[in-house]
Amino acid sequence: MNNLNRILLLIIIASSCTNPKSKNQEKQTPVDDSNWVVDASFETGHVGRYGIRADVNYNRTQVKKLLEINSLGVPLFFPEGTYRMNLIIDGSKNHYMVFNNATIAGQLQIIGQEAEKSSKINLKGKLTVLDKVFMRHAENISIETLHVVSDETNSLREIDNPGVSIYAGVDKVLIDSLFILNTIQSTLDHNKFSAAAFQVHGWNNNPKNINIDYLEIKNSGRSGVYLTGQNHEIGRLIIDSFGTTENTNMAGLEDASPGTEKNYKALWINKCNNCIVYEAEILQEPIENTYHLAVGVGDTSKPSVIEQLSFISENGEVSVKERIPSNVIVKNTTTSDVK
């Protein structure tokens, strides 16, 4: 049985186990995908069936047509390869996709409007994205394994990756594993609004309920993590090297004082209520005008907690910046010069 058949069988079994139907309920009619079929030699759900192949450029209209059949109830399967497209889910619902070590050469966007959010997005398998990952006005998103990396040779725009930005109106995001590598390596315009490799922000409508089991950031040109909002959970966080790109051509950050984005931080928690990081590890020696940890103001009745924070730097020195009144509690810390 090939991968696609196995995936579809599991979907059918899960549906029959979790959604039992009474005899009086009508059976769901299989989706007729005939209007979308380009190559019928591929099985239902395989993106090749709908004309999508690796190493071919696709425009937004072509991708939108692919997403139409997906939202109607046909799970999509992307076999291994590099897909030269921007995958933009805009004001749409009910998307289930499986990536078998597949790469998107452009951006991944899950966006909507306040009155029409993207919702119920499920991305299974291992997906690599070579350009920005951006979410706005979206909810109920589940991602299994996501790699966000710079690859100027193969990315659509031939640029370094601006990183991950979770913006206003986002709620209920669950990510099993997120790896962010070599982002924001230049001061070019595409990085102007990227102050951190992973930033969660949004003026007066900050994201809520972002849950990440494992987050690893390596070699961020600017800050590592900027976290605002409420009810976020990060299981294990590793930040290995940050702050090597010049702090020019930068826009400000919501909820931060103008100019503070230019003082890079490995982990920056600001106006974040009822958030928790269970285990954080920061690896880097201090650099002038940078901080290993920065904590901003917050609602002291809704504290955010770092259960275990480990600093590893060449000389054992640590730089911390605190703005009072902060609501961030660090329960346990360790400092060492050896990993």
Image: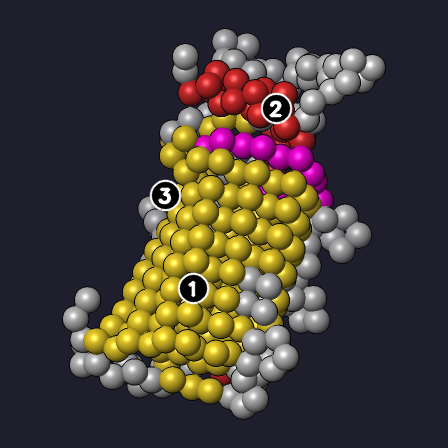
Q: Nearer the viewer, mark 3 or mark 2?
A: 2
Element type at mark 2: helix
| Magenta segment main secondary structure | strand
In the rendered image, residue 75 lying in the magenta stretch gets the answer no
Of 226 and 9, which appears nearest the observer? Answer: 9
* Three-letter code for the amino acid on which mark 1 is drawn: Tyr
Which stretch is magenta? Answer: 88-99
Give the mark, 3 or 2, whose residue is nearer the N terminus: 2
Q: Residue at x 60, y 58 (%)?
A: 209
Looking at the image, residue 311 lies above or below residue 136: below
* Three-letter code for the amino acid on which mark 2 is drawn: Cys
Q: Specify few, some or many for label 2: CA neighbours under 10 Å numbering under 14, 14-19, or 20 or more.
A: few
Residue, disc 1: 278
Quadrant where the N terminus sits is: top left
Residue 17's tag is 2
Q: Residue at x 55, y 44 (%)?
A: 142
In the rendered image, residue 98 lying in the magenta stretch gets the answer yes
Q: Residue at x 58, y 51 (%)?
A: 173
Indicate the quadrant where residue 279 lies: bottom left
Give the mark, 3 or 1, whose residue is nearer the N terminus: 3
Q: Are marks 2 and 1 in contact (CB under 8 Å)?
A: no
Give the mark, 2 or 1, whose residue is nearer the N terminus: 2
In the picture provided, is 44 more to the left or to the right than 292? Answer: right
Q: Specify few, some or many for label 1: CA neighbours under 10 Å numbering under 14, 14-19, or 20 or more.
A: some
Looking at the image, residue 56 lies above or below residue 241: above
* Mark-to-mark CA distance, 3 and 1: 36 Å
Residue, disc 3: 154
